[in-house]
Image (cartoon, grey):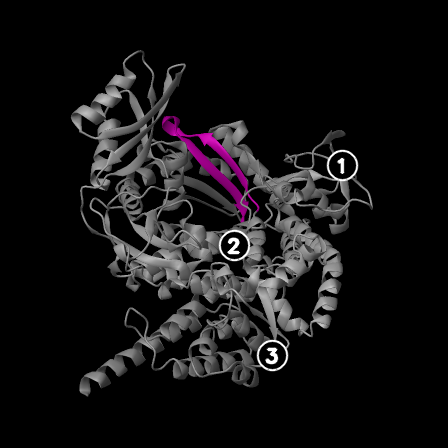
Amino acid sequence: MPEVLIQKEEDKRLIQRAYRQLLRSIKSPMDPDDRRNIRMAYELAVEAHSKQRRKSGEPYILHPIEVARICAEEIGLGPTAVVCALLHDVVEDTEVSLVDIRQKFGERIAKIVDGLTKLDSSFNSESPQAENFKKVLSTLVEDVRVVLIKMADRLHNMRTLGSMPRHKQLKIAAETTYIYSPLAHRLGLYAIKTEYQDLCMKITDPDAYFEIARKLQETKRDRTRYINEFIKPLTRQLDEINVPYRIFGRPKSIYSIWNKIKTKKVPFEEIYDLFAVRIVVDIEPYREKPICWQVYSIVTDVHKPIPERLKDWITTPKSNGYESLHTTVVGPKGRYVEVQIRSERMDEIAERGFAAHWKYKGSSNQPDVYEVWLDSVRDILENPNSDALEFLSDFKTNLFNEEVYVYTPRGDMKILPKGATALDFAFSIHTDIGYHCTAVKVNNKLVPMGYKIKNGDQISVTTSKNQKPNESWLKMAVTGKARSKIRSAMKEERRQQGELGKEALERKFRNLKIDFESGVETLVRYFDFSSRIDLFYALAKEHLHLHEELKHFRVEGGKLIEIEPEKRPVEEPAPADKVVPKRTRKKFTGRPRLLVGGEPADQYNYSFASCCNPVQGDDIFAYLTATAGLKIHRASCPNATHLMANFGYRIMKAEWLETTDTTFVADLKVTGIDNGPGIIERLTHEISTNLGVNIRSFNIWGDEGYFEGKISLLVANTDQLNLAIRQLQNLEIVSTVTRIE
C-alpha cells in the first residue's frame, strides 16, 4: 500500500511539473477566459485519464500535456489550441463525450476536438486509416488548428516510440513518412518535417542513422572551426551596412545527409555541404528585398559564387510560403558552402510555416499562398463520390516538394507541382475549362494534353462544349484537383447512362414482385460491383443480361435467393488478426523458417515479395494480400510505406525463426573505373572464388572510362551479403556498391 501511495505522489509531482512547463511555454496573450479554460481542460483531462498509463509506464496525462506544450512552444499556437490539445484524447479513450465538451467549452472547441477524434474502429471500410486521415484532413479548410494539433500529437508519439513493439514502430513510421512529413512540408513547418524524417529513419534504418550521427559528432569540432573561418571575413563587411543581423552555421539533418549519400552515391567523407551558413537580418518588411540582395552581394564578393546554384525565393516564394535567397559559394580549401539569406520574418515563417504566417498576413505583396492551396484541397473535398483511398491519393499529389511556375496568356502566374501536365493546368484555371479542354498551346505551339509543363511556359487552352473527360485523361493528369474532377465527371456520366438499366431493373422486379432495394443489394454483392451505379451501367450497356442472370436466383418473400452458392465470388480475406491458418499445408525442407504473428509461418500460405527480395537477417513484416496469401516484405521495401499507411490492419509482425541452408536472391549495383579488359574477371573472381558466393546473373556496360554493373547473388543471409558488398568496395576499380531496393 505505501508503495502505491509513493507512486501516486511521484506521478502527481511529475504531472504538476509538466503542467507548469506548459503554462510557461504559452507566449500568446491570454484573457481570464483563456486561463480558466486551460485550467478546466487540464483538470478534466487529469481526471479522465487518471486510470490510464502509456506503454512506457508513465501516467497517460503527460502525453496530452506535452502535445499542448509542442503546440504552444514549437508551433506557436494560442490558448484555444492548448485547450483542444489537452482534450484531444478524452472523447476517444475515456467516458467524456463530445456533448460534455460542448457544454463546458463551447461549439468552437468541441468542433476541433471532434476533428481530432478517430472514427469508431468498427467503421466498415477497406482502409480505416485512410478514413481517419480523410476526417482529419477534411477539417483543413474549416480550422487548420486540427491538423496542426494532430501533427504535434504525432511528433510526441514519434519521440516516445521506443516502448512500442517493433512492428508497431514500423507502421507508425510509415504513416508519418507517407502523410505527416509531406504535410508538414506543405504547411511550411520545416523544423517538424525535419524531425519527422530523422525519427522515421531512426526506426527504418537505425544502423545508417547512428553511423551518420556518430560521424557528425566526430567532425563537430572541425566543422565549427571551418564555419568560423568562413564567417570571419564576412562579418567585417556586414557590419558596415548598419543593419542588425545574425550569422551562424546549421548542420544538415541526418536524413538529408543520408539522402544525399544515397542519391549522389558518395561516402559521408565526400559530402562537403554538411551544413548551411544562415544570415538573418532584422529589418522592416519594405526594406527586406534590397537588404537581402545587398547581403548576397557581400557574400559573393568575399567567396566565389556558383551562379547556377542561386535560388531566389524572395521574388517568388515557394507555395508553402517559404522566402529566402539561397546560393552556393566556394569557401576556404575549395569546399562548397550553401548560404541562406533572409529576414527575421522570413526565418520565423520558414521554421513555423502556416502557424507564423497569420502573424505576418498582409505584410508581403505576394498572394496568400495558403489560401490558394486550401482552395485546391476544397476542390478535392467537393467530390462526394471519392472513397477514402482515392481522396488520400489525390491529397498526396497536392503535397508536392517542388513546383513549376507557368503563365496564362494574360501573364498571370500559376504554381503547379513539378511533373504536372497541360491538362492539370487547364483544371487549375477552372473546372469547366478542364472538362471541355480540346487542345493546349505552350509558347504558341500545339502540344499533347499530357505534355509536362516547364518553368516559364506560357499556356493557352482551347475548349469545346462537346468535349468531356474519358478514362485516358486519368493517365494524363497528376494533380489531385484534376484527377478528382475527372473521376467525378466520369461517375456522373456512368450514372446518367445507367438510368436506362435502372428503369429496366425496376420493371423486371415489379413483374416478379421483388423488393427493389433488397434485390439491387443482392445483385451488387453477387457480381462484386463497387456500387449500384456500376450495376445499372452494366445493364444499360448490356454487359449483363437480366434474363440469363436471374436464372441463378429464386424469389422468396419478395427477395432474391441464390440457388447455387458455390458460384459466389471469392470473398476478401479477413483482417490480419482473423486469418484462418491453412493447417493442411505441407512443409518441405529448405524453406526458410519464419514466425508470423508469433506463430510458425508454415501454417500460412506465404511467399517472398519480388519488389524487395528479403534476405535472411533483414528486418521484415508480413502483408496479407487480397488473393495471394501472405507476402513477406523488407521493412525498407519501396512499397512498405504505402502498405503500412493505407492497410495497417493487414500488416502482421514477421521475424526469422532460425537459420537454414536456404539461399536468397539479392541484387547489387556496382559502379567504377573502366580501365581496360579484365573487369568482369576481377569482379566474378572476388565473388565466386574468394567468397564462394553463387552468381545468379551478371549485366555490365562501360563507356568513356566508367562502368556500371548489376549482379544478382544467391546468399544465405545479410551477413554474407554485407561481406560481399565490403569486399567489392575494397577493389580499387570499384567506386560504389549498393543493394538495389
Tell which of 680 and 375 is nearer to you.
680
Residue 202 seen in the current view: no
Q: Which residue: 36% across, 63% down?
A: 579
**How many numbered discs?**
3
Q: Which residue is mark 2?
A: 183
Q: Is residue 550 above or below residue 435?
A: below
Q: Which residue is mark 3?
A: 107
Callout 3: SS: helix
**Local crowd at mark 2 within 10 Å, few (<14), some, or many (≥20)?**
many
Q: CA distance from mark 3 to mark 2?
A: 27 Å
Q: Residue at 59% across / 59% down in the picture?
A: 529
Q: For the C terminus, give its image quadrant.
A: top left
Give the quarter of the figure containing the N terminus: bottom left
Q: Earlier in the sequence, mark 1 or mark 2?
A: 2
- Quick check: marks 1 and 3 in contact, CB under 8 Å? no
Q: Residue furthest bottom?
A: 1
Mark identifier at residue 252: none
Callout 1: helix, strand or loop? strand
| Residue 325 belongs to magenta span | yes
Amino acid residing under circle 1: Ala
Residue denoted by label 1: 439
The amino acid type, in three-letter code, at marker 2 is: Leu
The amino acid type found where label 3 is placed reads Glu
